[in-house]
Image: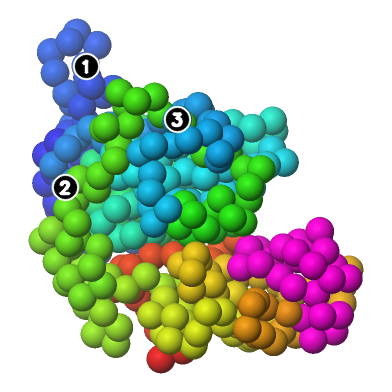
């Protein structure tokens, strides 16, 4: 894929590959796509072409205890968990390193689970806004972040993942509804959701997905290299430290919860705050390397929380709560708190670049 930029008109020409070839087979055609809201100096060609990183649809899921088809994972492997169709599903980073988008169809739910390895950002989007169309990988990057495209646009609409909104083409300005996800280790997911499912692979395929193609050092928190792609810098935290972020909403400023700062609080931690005009809480579990933002309400009654040695407990009933907001013992056992769908995990500098004015909740 090649790209040229005309900043005066805020338009760029994308040379699309196979799907955009001319009818006579003579080769790719150039389309002009309006991108008036993007800083084109931060837009880059990833060099792989459209669909050069192939999104996948409805891969095979197997029970989490099916060891023969999960051999490509270790307990420390990171996975993205999503609740769909009445069950928890795990989509491992190992899969996302090479596909970046998994389009899922479960009953009435049509969701795109997305992960950008360069920015460490995991988000899930309802596809209803694009009439159920699948999303694919455009091959372009904005602030080093995955730019998706939808396969229903008459011409290309482009969606920078961390905006969750079309910023180019005929759908410019359209917002995608988000689904909540939890990022944790594979060992943590199995503990949290023993009845869950995960993408399963046969022995031959497992060999293709048991490593990080970006290299073992890419995700080190202090590594400031985003493979040369332009991204604004913010030195308040290490460049690739993972943070759980809450975007600005209803007058709230963006807030980041750094993983290392939460780890330093002990085995568990709870942060209580107002966000979007309503109470919110962030739960952290050090062993599972997981954080989630929840609404602390059960049947309309607010809860407050205390960390004890073996977990997180509410002060009102003494019920224990997991990092995903599920009560595992006490009066509320079996109940779940609403996860805030806008919250997601990303590397610190990309988070700060996409969420200007971010306040760090815990230093």
* Magenta stretch contains residue 132: no
User: Is 138 placed left or right of 270 in the picture?
Assistant: left
Q: Are marks 1 and 3 in contact (CB under 8 Å)?
A: no
Question: In front of the other: label 1 or label 3?
Answer: 3
Q: Are marks 1 and 2 in contact (CB under 8 Å)?
A: no
Please state the extent of the stretch shown in magenta in the rendering. 314-340
Identified at 80% across, 74% down, the residue is 319
Quarter of the image for the C terminus: give it.
Answer: bottom left
Closer to the chain start, of discs 3 and 2, is 2
Give the SS element for disc 2.
strand
Identified at 20% across, 45% down, the residue is 213
Residue identified by numbered label 1: 22
Q: Are marks 3 and 2 in contact (CB under 8 Å)?
A: no
Residue identified by numbered label 3: 68
Disc on res. 45: 2
Identified at 24% across, 48% down, the residue is 212
User: Is 350 placed left or right of 15 in the picture?
Assistant: right
């Amino acid at each position: 894929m090649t790209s040229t930029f005309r900043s005066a008109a805020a338009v760029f020409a994308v040379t699309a590959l196979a799907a955009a070839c001319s009818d006579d087979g003579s080769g790719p055609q150039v389309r002009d796509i309006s991108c008036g809201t993007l800083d084109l100096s931060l837009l880059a060609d990833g060099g792989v072409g459209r669909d050069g990183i192939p999104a996948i649809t409805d891969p095979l899921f197997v029970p989490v205890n099916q060891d023969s088809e999960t051999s490509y994972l270790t307990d420390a492997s990171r996975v993205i968990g999503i609740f769909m169709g009445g069950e928890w599903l795990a989509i491992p980073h190992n899969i996302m390193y090479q596909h970046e988008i998994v389009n899922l169809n479960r009953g009435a739910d049509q969701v795109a689970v997305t992960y950008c390895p360069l920015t460490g950002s995991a988000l899930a989007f309802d596809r209803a806004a694009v009439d159920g169309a699948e999303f694919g990988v455009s091959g372009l990057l904005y602030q080093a972040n995955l730019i998706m495209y939808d396969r229903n646009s008459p011409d290309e609409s482009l969606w920078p993942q961390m905006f969750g909104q079309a910023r180019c083409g005929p759908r410019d300005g359209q917002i995608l509804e988000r689904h909540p996800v939890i990022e944790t280790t594979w060992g943590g997911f199995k503990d949290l959701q023993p009845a869950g499912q995960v993408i399963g692979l046969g022995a031959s395929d497992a060999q293709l997905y048991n490593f990080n193609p970006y290299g073992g050092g890419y995700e080190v928190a202090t590594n400031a290299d985003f493979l040369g792609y332009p991204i604004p810098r913010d030195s308040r935290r290490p460049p690739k430290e993972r943070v759980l972020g809450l975007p600005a909403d209803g007058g709230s400023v963006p807030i980041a919860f750094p993983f290392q700062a939460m780890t330093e609080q002990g085995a568990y931690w709870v942060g209580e705050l107002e966000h979007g005009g309503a109470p919110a809480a962030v739960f952290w579990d050090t062993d599972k390397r997981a954080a989630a933002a929840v609404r602390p309400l059960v049947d309309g009654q607010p809860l407050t929380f205390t960390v004890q040695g073996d977990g997180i407990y509410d002060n009102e009933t003494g019920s224990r709560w997991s990092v995903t907001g599920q009560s595992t013992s006490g009066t509320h056992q079996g109940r779940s708190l609403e996860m805030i769908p806008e919250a997601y995990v990303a590397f610190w500098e990309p988070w700060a670049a996409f969420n200007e004015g971010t306040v760090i909740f815990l230093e």
